Image: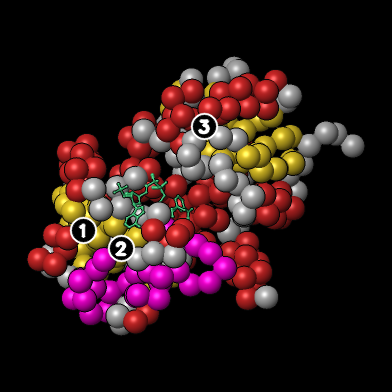
Amino acid sequence: MATPDRYAVFGHPISHSLSPRIHRLFARQTGQPLAYDAQDVPADAFEAAVTSFLSDGGRGLNCTVPLKELAFRIADRLSPRARRAQAVNTLALQADGCLLGDNTDGAGLVRDLTANLGLRLSGQRLLILGAGGATRGILAPLLEHAPAAVVIANRTAARAVTLEHEFRDLGPVTGCGLETLADAAPCDLILNATAASLSGELPPLPPGILAPGGACYDLAYGQRPTPFVRWGQAHGARLSVDGIGMLVEQAAEAFALWRGIRPETGPVIAVLTADRER
Ligand code: NAP
């Protein structure tokens, strides 16, 4: 039997990553011969780990916290969306030996919001909490859908304002501090792209910030509903969900880049959801 092509996710910490499970399910579903593992790689070991992985026959990598900006810097070529985001979550070895850097986070989120959850983005008022790497990755793909407004609110206001300046050529983006939200108009969709959920915290939100019939989406995910998902449920959101669908969709984009075949995501989201209910 031929040796399967090797892929991996690098990150730190990485032990709880669901990416190996997702990509192995994709491989089985599509009949693609590949192996996919998780490797704990701190930032200072990243370049050496990539070189070693590729010289051992590795074909592609996912990079997660805290490596996305480093991956952006080591890529030989960048997709337009990775160049915009200045962050790379997928590296693919090309036939000419170059390492292509892509960012599939935004496409994954938009696909989960629109195709899986049936949410409309055009003409809607969107609020993004957080101005870190994830927000960089999702801004351009969200703006492509012509929302009426995108407000970025961050604990450190200056980082949100920087993103406003970087992305305002693409649409109606404004950046502010979280405290300014008390004076903001209600929003149809609130996306939590802060790392607060990871430590069981919730960014401070004024009660009227969610429009009647609005939806809440936490990019973070876990075994149980995150504090932000629970906030949405308690404040009348018609939908309040976490980022497991985005995780599977961004993985499907990476898989398609590597293998030239797009797996079906619905069955994999169903498996991960069932895993959590056990
Ligand atoms: P990051 O670059 O480290 O940025 C973290 C952001 O969270 C910053 O804006 C930071 O504000 C803010 N923050 C951290 N703790 C906070 C708190 N206690 N209260 C309020 N704000 C807080 O992280 P990232 O890469 O953007 O990731 C953000 C989240 O998205 C993580 O939960 C990650 O797991 C998730 N994510 C999910 C997917 C998926 O596929 N579902 C993909 C990518 C990311 P300051 O600027 O003030 O420090």
Counting residues from the N terminus, which is met first, the one under dot 1 or under dot 2? 1
Q: Amino acid at mark 3?
A: Ala
Is residue 163 placed above or below 249 in the rendered structure? above
Secondary element at tag 3:
helix
Percent x, y of residue 243: 47, 61
Question: Which of the two residues, 160 or 28, is positioned nearer the viewer here?
Answer: 160
Q: Amino acid at mark 1?
A: Leu
Question: Which of the two residues, 257 or 46, is positioned nearer the viewer here?
Answer: 46
At label 1, counting other C-alpha atoms closer than 10 Å, the crowd grade (few under 14, some 14-19, many 20 or more) is: many
Report whether the residue tagged 2 is closer than 8 Å to ligand 1.
Answer: yes
Secondary element at tag 2:
loop
Q: Is residue 10 visible?
A: yes
Is residue 177 placed above or below 10 in the rendered structure? below
Residue 43 is labelled as 3
Secondary element at tag 1:
helix
Q: Which residues are magenta?
A: 203-232
